[in-house]
Image (spheres, helix red, strand yellow):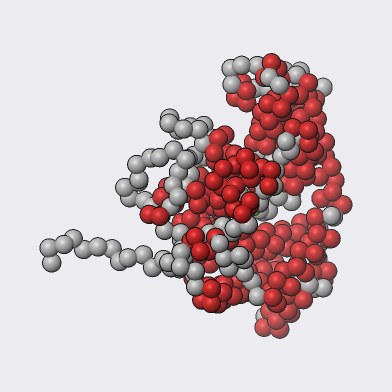
């Protein structure tokens, strides 16, 4: 044999995202030598400052509540793990799913949804604030470390996956990634997977963290049939298992069943729709990565339970109210006096000369980039009477 031995052809399905047919990057660059384009996206995300900050940001529990809870960083890694398993089983592009999963929460404010709601309210007159759009803004503009472009210059497919939803008004301003919202198309299958992997991850880890925090109980959770079925099944099988292990075993079985159901259902859908390529997936008219109807019902029950018993728990509410107040106060004080902003946030020129819309966006970017603990410190630095330095 004179020809050099080649690695086996990738086993990607025809409707998977193939890096060689990517719609490309905003600024063209020479292709990587030893990585695929999507691996390069993932690597850029992992090396970004916004990614490192995910370690100190939370979804439900404020970061310093305890070391055992999920942070946005561990959440994103769980989403990537679940997403990759699904992608591999469906012969889709694992690297792309991983890139989307690791980037999907980069735009989140400190203090989870309370922080995002507060910042959105502050920004009402200035174009609003939405974490999903902010994640795209982080990778497109705010990370400033490459010599030749602002942002990370990611491929279209990763950016498409990051932007899960957006209003039609904003879609019109976004160019290529906004188009699908205007013409009713779907994103590629890898983006669809990342989206559902996100949901599987947070539903299950919120159950786990909620139990650990003592905000919800096993007894109460047993009103959710899906949880109850796993839990009592394990109890029969292992009657003397300590509770912590019971809970972990229950959560792991729930994740496993949800993932398996999603793969089976999506497999069937893909077989019957048989899209010939990614473009056919985008134009299919409905999502092709889905749960069965039964699993959808069960998921709804878990979500309803968490909304009622965890997200609205008075202890979570107290954290939320405090978090909102801090965000509102920070925003107000910076709007009143842009000279209080650090130069890292504004660049060398004062923002007080700028029109209010521009000032508000600089402030929103600065606040959104804060970790939970940084926001608390910044609040004390600005409002704590004991700190006059
Ligand atoms: Mg998420």
Which residue is at the front of the view, 132 or 106? 132
Give x and y (percent) for residue 361.
68, 30
Compared to residue 41, the image places residue 248 above or below, namely: below
Which residue is at the front of the view, 20 or 78? 20
Which residue is at the front of the view, 371 or 234? 371
**Viewer can see residue 326:** no
Compared to residue 198, the image places residue 237 above or below, namely: below
Question: Which residue is pictured at 73% across the width and 72% down the height?
Answer: 298
Give x and y (percent) for residue 386.
80, 22
Question: Which residue is pictured at 64% across the width and 71% down the height?
Answer: 291
Question: Which residue is pictured at 59% across the width and 59% down the height?
Answer: 186
Q: How many marks?
A: 0
Relative to 376, 82 lies left or right = left
Quarter of the image with the C terminus is top right
Question: Which residue is pictured at 69% across the width and 75% down the height?
Answer: 293
Compared to residue 320, the image places residue 242 above or below, namely: below
* Residue at the extreme front: 183
Relative to 312, 164 lies left or right = left
Question: In which image quadrant can residue 51 be found?
Answer: top right
Which residue is at the front of the view, 155 or 380? 155
Give x and y (percent) for residue 246.
69, 72
Give x and y (percent) for residue 322.
83, 39
Compared to residue 13, the image places residue 126 above or below, namely: above
Quarter of the image with the N terminus is bottom left
**Viewer can see residue 199:** yes
């Amino acid at each position: 044999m004179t020809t050099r031995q080649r690695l086996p052809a990738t086993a990607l399905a025809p409707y998977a995202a193939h890096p060689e047919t990517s719609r490309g990057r905003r600024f063209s660059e020479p292709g990587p030598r030893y990585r695929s384009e999507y691996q390069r996206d993932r690597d850029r995300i992992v090396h970004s400052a916004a990614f490192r900050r995910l370690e100190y940001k939370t979804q439900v529990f404020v970061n310093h509540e305890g070391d055992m809870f999920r942070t946005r960083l561990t959440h994103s890694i769980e989403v990537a793990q679940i997403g990759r398993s699904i992608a591999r089983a469906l012969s889709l592009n694992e690297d792309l799913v991983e890139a989307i999963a690791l980037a999907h929460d980069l735009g989140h404010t400190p203090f989870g949804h309370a922080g995002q709601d507060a910042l959105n309210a502050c920004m009402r007159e200035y174009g609003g604030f939405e974490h999903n759009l902010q994640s795209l803004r982080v990778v497109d503009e705010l990370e400033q470390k490459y010599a030749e472009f602002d942002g990370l210059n990611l491929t279209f497919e990763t950016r498409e996956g990051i932007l899960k939803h957006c209003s039609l008004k904003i879609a019109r301003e976004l160019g290529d990634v906004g188009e699908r919202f205007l013409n009713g198309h779907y994103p590629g299958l890898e983006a669809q997977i990342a989206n559902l992997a996100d949901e599987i991850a947070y539903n299950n880890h919120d159950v786990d963290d909620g139990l650990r925090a003592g905000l919800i109980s096993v007894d109460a959770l047993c009103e959710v049939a899906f949880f109850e079925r796993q839990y009592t099944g394990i109890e029969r099988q292992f009657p003397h298992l300590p509770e912590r292990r019971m809970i972990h075993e229950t959560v792991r079985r729930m994740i496993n069943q949800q993932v398996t159901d999603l793969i089976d259902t999506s497999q069937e859908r893909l077989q019957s729709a048989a899209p010939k390529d990614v473009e056919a997936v985008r134009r299919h008219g409905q999502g092709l990565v889905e749960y069965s109807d039964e699993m959808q019902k069960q998921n709804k029950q878990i979500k309803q339970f968490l909304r009622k018993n965890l997200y609205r728990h008075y202890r979570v509410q107290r954290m939320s109210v405090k978090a909102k107040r801090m965000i509102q106060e920070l925003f107000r004080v910076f709007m009143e006096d842009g000279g209080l902003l650090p130069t890292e946030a504004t660049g060398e020129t004062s923002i007080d000369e700028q029109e209010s819309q521009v000032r508000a966006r600089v402030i929103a970017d600065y606040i959104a980039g804060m970790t939970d603990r940084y926001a608390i410190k910044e609040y004390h630095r600005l409002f704590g009477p004991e700190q006059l330095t």
